[in-house]
Each structure stands twice: as structure tokens, then as C-alpha cells.
Image: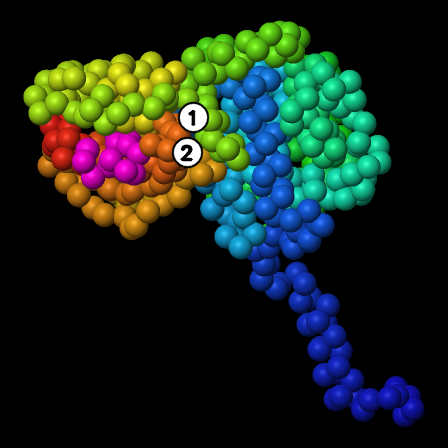
Amino acid sequence: MSSHSKFPVPHRLAFFLLALCLAAAPVVAQRGAPVLPNPGNPSMSRDQQEKLGLQAAAEVYKQMPVLPDSNPLTQYVQRLGARRVKTIPPDRSWPYQFHVIEQKEINAFALPGGPIFINVGTIRMASSEAELAGVMSHEMAHVYMQHSAKQQQKSSLLGALAGIAGAVAGAWGGNWGTLAQSGIQFGAGTLMLKYSRADEAQADAVGAIIMWKADYNPVALADFFEKLEKQGGNGPQFLSDHPNPGNRREAIEREIAEWPNKPYRQDNTQFAVARKEADAAPAYTAQEISAGAKTGRWVRQNRENGAVFKGAVSPELTVPAAPFSAVQPSETFQQTMLSTIRIAYPQNWQVTRGQQPDSATIAPAAGVSGGAVAYGAVIHSLQMEDPNQTVQQLTQWLAQTLISGDANMQQLGQFQQISVTGRAAGSLNLQTISPMPGPNGKPQPEQDWLVAIPRGDGTAIELIFVSPQLHFGLLKPAFDRILRSVSF
């Protein structure tokens, strides 16, 4: 060994061992959980993005057939979406909401600020809940990364996007000019948003993080897109709006390789039920939707079905104004039997049964219109997300589902545990905009009292007592009496 070596033998040995440890460090180091990236700050403000998204969503309800929020399929999608929203830090989240379009073709799109729409055909195409969750996470990522705002910024508003809607904008007028300038175009029975391949790669990466945080295998996102590409002509619009960034599966697998291992959620009965609901749900082709939009068919159908978009900048008032005397509950109550629930209600109110067992609306005739409820009680039977949920977890989960479906809704006060028919139940108050105008003819606040009753078999009963805030105190005694009458 040369005497000219830089280190004496003992020092060289120590140096060698240190180098060996450093070389091995990446292999043995604890892998860190993925972190959502900084989305950046496009020139379009947060408020502008939210208003634009609500404006476009209101147009969707005019141009396309949408399932009402009371539909079991929509409720399933909203619960699935709410689980994903929880993975995003509140300071970087958006008022996400989730809706289902009655369209056969496979498509999904996210609007600026949070509204997300999923076609019935997309749910039918999903082979697992993880695949559907992958599509939804991908769309949520577009909102999170503010891709629409950034695309508009790249086009300077006056470039290539300015003429996208062209003749359509002139024919329809109204909001079309603003939407067209933002690259949002309705046509051929769908809404078209253009994303770049870089946007798609970023939405895959961020969507994978959202999935992992919600305990779903991120590779399922790639599974769905690969299956769609193999279908060829079944999803041209989706593939046009979402160009393949290349090596989707490889990129996702490479990304998650450095994340901690964890058990992923498996399919459950809720997904199986949702698939059956999707298979049975009415669905129209793009051509039928395009033709129906020109005749105003979907405006009428959505209103008749109770598919009313409450999150518009100026809420649509769909229940005609009525004096309190027209909705005031009688002191005389009578009983009715739903499927497995017996309940009493004011004699001058009416019971309208829902499509599902133990689902109904109890309301005065003057308090409802076209599926919108201004005064009354709405009852749903549902499958719990987790049979082991506490009463508080169940109540908060249902509240988050409602908030996810209504951009104007917010929580009032704190959770309270109560007793209903001898069972532990949850109570929570929410606030939104009433579908009935106030005394001055303008929108008025609505108070919604949510009561959740787990039944001990993995199912639960959800009751929502509804009234304009102005009269909620006057109706509270009747609501209490209805609740006390519940028996199984």
C-alpha cells in the first residue's frame, strides 16, 4: 500500500464504511407519504374560477339530462367524492360537488372551481370502485391544479379560445360568450374542455396521490384509461378531452414505488348496487342530448325530476312563494307505514314515496314543486360507508355528502348526539339557499336539520327537516313530533 495515500489505513477504512452506508441509505430509508404539490397561482382569481364554474354548471343543467341529487346513484357518487375531498388540505381545496349525467357515452369533466360531472356510461364502464374513484380523482386533480384557468391564461383570452363557440355563442347568447372565452364549449351532446398532454400527466400524478390518500390503488386510474383506449370508438370525446400523455401505467407505477405500502380498499356491496343502478338508469346518446337541448327538453325534464342546480350564482327559485298559513302543519297527526318505518305526520301534509324502500318526502303541497322541497321532511334509507362508523362519523359523512352536492351549503353549529326510538342518533344543522323566494321576492336562507339513525345492520336512516330559516323555529315543534314518532 503506497505511503502516498491520502488517508492512513484506519481512516480509509472508516471512510469506506461511511461511503458504503451512504450508498445503501436510499434502499433502507423510510419511504415518505406523497404530498400534494403547490398548484401555483394563475392570474384568474379563486373567486373568478368558482363563479365561472357555477355559471358553466348551470348551463349543463339546461343543456343535458342530469340525475337529481336524491337519486341513489348520484348519492353514491357524491359519497365517493366526499371521501376524496377529505384528502386535500382545506387551504388548497375547492367547493367540490359531484353530479351524474344521463348519457350513454363514456365521459367525465371538471369545471373551474369544483363542479364535476360523471356520465352514466362511465359508471357502467368501471369494473371496480377503484377505477371509478380513479376517474373522479383525475378530474378533481384538474380542479386542484387549476388547469382551466392556466389554459385560459396561456391563450390570453383573446387567442385561439376566443372563437371556439363561434356560431353557437351567437345562436344561444346569454352566458355563452364568457364561457367560450374560457375554452368551455357545449356541442354534439356534450361539454368539451381541452387539456394538454402535460395537463393530463399532471392530473394523473395528482390524482394518484388523492387515490392513495383515500386508500385506493392508484394503478386503477391507468386501468380505466387503458380499457377505454381498447374500446376505440366508445369514448372518443373523453379521449379527445383527455389526450394520452404516454406510458400512463408506467408513470403511475414509478411514482407509487417510493410511497409507503398500505392495504387498499376492495370492492363492496355499495359499488355492486351502484353498477346495477347505472345499468338500469335512463341514458341518452350524444345525438339525442344535442337534439333535446335545442328544444329545451332537458330544462323541462330536469325540473320535473327535481334535478335543480342549487349552486348557481343566482339560485333558481323553483317553488312559488306561499304564505306561512299555506304550509303551517296541522296539530292533528296521522301515521303511515313506509317499508320498515312507521312515522306520523301532520294531517294537512302529504307523503310522496321515493323509488327506494323507506324513502319519502313529507311536505305541504305549497312547500314543494318539481322535486324541490322548501318546507317538509325528506327520508332516505342508505348503506353505511363503514358498518363500524360511530354515530358522529355517520352524521358528519352524510353532512359532507350534502355539502359536496350544494355549493351554497354549509354547516351550522356542532354535532349533537340524540336518541331516536331508543337508538343513538346524530343531529346536525346545515344552511343553504331555499328554492322558495323570501317575502321580498329574493333568495332567502334555508335551514336543514339532519338526523342520522344507524340501524345496527350496516344501514341507516337519514332524515332532513327543511324550512326557510325565517320559519324554522315555528316548524321545529312539528319536526320534533315527527321524529319522536319514528319506529322500526
Q: Is residue 469 magenta?
A: yes
Determine whether the residue tagged by mark 2 lies in a helix, strand or loop.
loop
Q: Position of residue 334 (x, y in %)?
A: 10, 18
Q: Give the extent of the magenta segment.
A: 461-475
Q: Using residue 202 as the reference point, say whether residue 414 is left or right of it.
A: left
Check disc 1 and report the residue beneath it. Answer: 317
Looking at the picture, how far across and down is residue 118, in whole percent?
A: 56, 25
User: Which residue occupies 68% across, 18% down?
Assistant: 172
Can you say which quadrant of the picture contains the C terminus? Answer: top left
Q: Position of residue 140 (x, y in %)?
A: 59, 39
Asked if the residue under mark 2 is in contact with the one under mark 1, i.e. CB atoms within 8 Å, the reply is yes
Q: Which residue is mark 2?
A: 443
Q: Secondary structure at mark 1?
A: loop
Q: Is residue 366 visible?
A: yes
Q: Is residue 69 left or right of residue 391?
A: right
Q: Residue furthest left?
A: 332
Between 207 and 187, the residue placed more toward the observer is 187
Q: Amino acid at mark 1?
A: Leu
Image coordinates of residue 439 in percent, x first then y, are 33, 32
